[in-house]
Image (cartoon, rainbow, N blue to C red):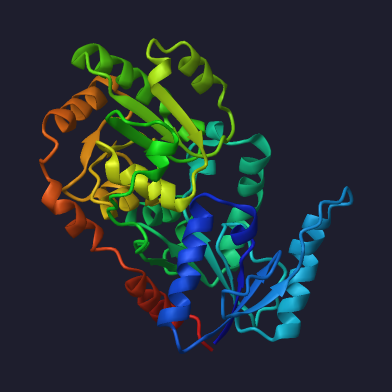
Amino acid sequence: MRIAIIADPLDNQTAGIHTYLKQFIKALVEYDKENEYILIRGKKDPSIPFRQIAIPNIQLPIGFAAIRLFFIIPLIMRWLRVDAVLEPAHFGPFNLPKRIKRITVIHDLTPFLFPQFHRFLSQLLQRLFLKRILKKTDLILSNSQHTTQDIIRFFPFTKTKVATILLGRDLDFQPVDSHSYLDENNISQTYFLCTGTIEPRKNLTILLEAYHLFRQKTKEKVLLIITGKEGWKTTTFHQSLEQHPFREDILLTGFVEKSSLIELYSHSLALVYPSLYEGFGLPVLEALSCQTKVICSNRSSLPEVGGEVAYYFNPENAEDLLQKMTEVYKNPQKKQDKLLEQAHKFSWEKYVSSFVQALTRIEK
């Protein structure tokens, strides 16, 4: 099959969907020799051996982004005579003839489950378009059993269209001895790490509360490092942060490059991930791959990733999180030998193999 991938997240995002798509394309290059792929994106990357069509997403007041999405890209699909179009970011593909198969990736349904955690326009567009998108799509890719259950619960007609394929691990994430990022930022104390976009769904106020309790209980100077870009609706978090009695020991790094993140994982006591909902939870897998213990929410898909090696807690209970942080702090070697074993269960080679198998459902 000749398959076009709407690869805009490679150019306009840095978080989960960007990471997913980058790894997926890398794996397709290595493991799928049967199908032809064409990337449609804002700019070309010569390091990717697939054919790439660059359509700059020009910021104009006349709504060029909508024209690009609904008219220009579909016209190019016809011109390229593709067999299928894959949209990795929920929203589309749009305006295609019936002969072109549609593949839509659903990472999560948070705009439906937690609309209060999203910008109004973002969740409104999902509610207006997603049902129609899924009615027209031929194949839906879901990245966890939990996400699949949510999709079928909200849209029962999708039951026969969904392929559940767990994501793979990025092989760049592995334990490292280097301390260059830590040295550059004068980080010499023991620390807990939390990573991800700063937004309400990540539940960081509970983390701040549990960290306060932990510091009161242990009487030791253990830092809390929070990495990730500033997202939306962050006022409550920043208010809690500025009022925190241990504010000087909480570091906000902003976005960090992959090499620095790997170093932060490798030398942390544990990743603490209190998210209320995740479609998959890549940071959990990244941490395990770096042989880093994980303390995470017992909600949504996270137990599918953390397996039996993660420490789970109720994300609405700071005392529960405190207990797990204390347990890890007092018993740093517990479960240590099982972390990589869990991480190795996730493979992009397996992902591509399952994806190619799923394509047989829609081949002409």
Q: Is residue 302 left or right of residue 6?
A: left
| Residue 116 image offset from top left, x and y in percent | 55, 31
Q: Is residue 355 visible?
A: yes
Q: Nearer the viewer, residue 255 or 326?
A: 255
**Residue at figure coordinates x 30%, y 31% from the top left:** 191
Please state if 287 lies on the left or on the right of 152 as rendered: left
In the image, 47 versus 19, the foreground residue is 47
Q: Position of residue 356 (x, y in %)?
A: 42, 80
State the count of labels. Answer: 0
Counting from the top left corner in percent of width and height, residue 134 is at: 56, 62
Location of residue 284 with respect to 210 vertically, above or below: below
Q: Say left or right for 230 vs 328.
A: right
212 over 310 or under it: above or below: above
What quarter of the picture does the N terminus occupy?
A: bottom right
In depth, the one of 235 and 241 nearer the eye is 241
In the image, residue 244 above or below residue 260: above
Identity of the residue drawn at 24% across and 36% down:
269
* Viewport quadrant of the C terminus: bottom right
Residue 300: tell me if it is visible: no
Residue 15 location (% of width, % of height): 52, 49
Q: Which residue is found at the position 57% from the left and 68% from the top? A: 137
Q: Quadrant of residue 318?
A: top left
The image quadrant that residue 142 belongs to is bottom left
For the point 73% across and 71% down, which residue is it?
54
Closer to the camera in the image, 347 or 258: 258
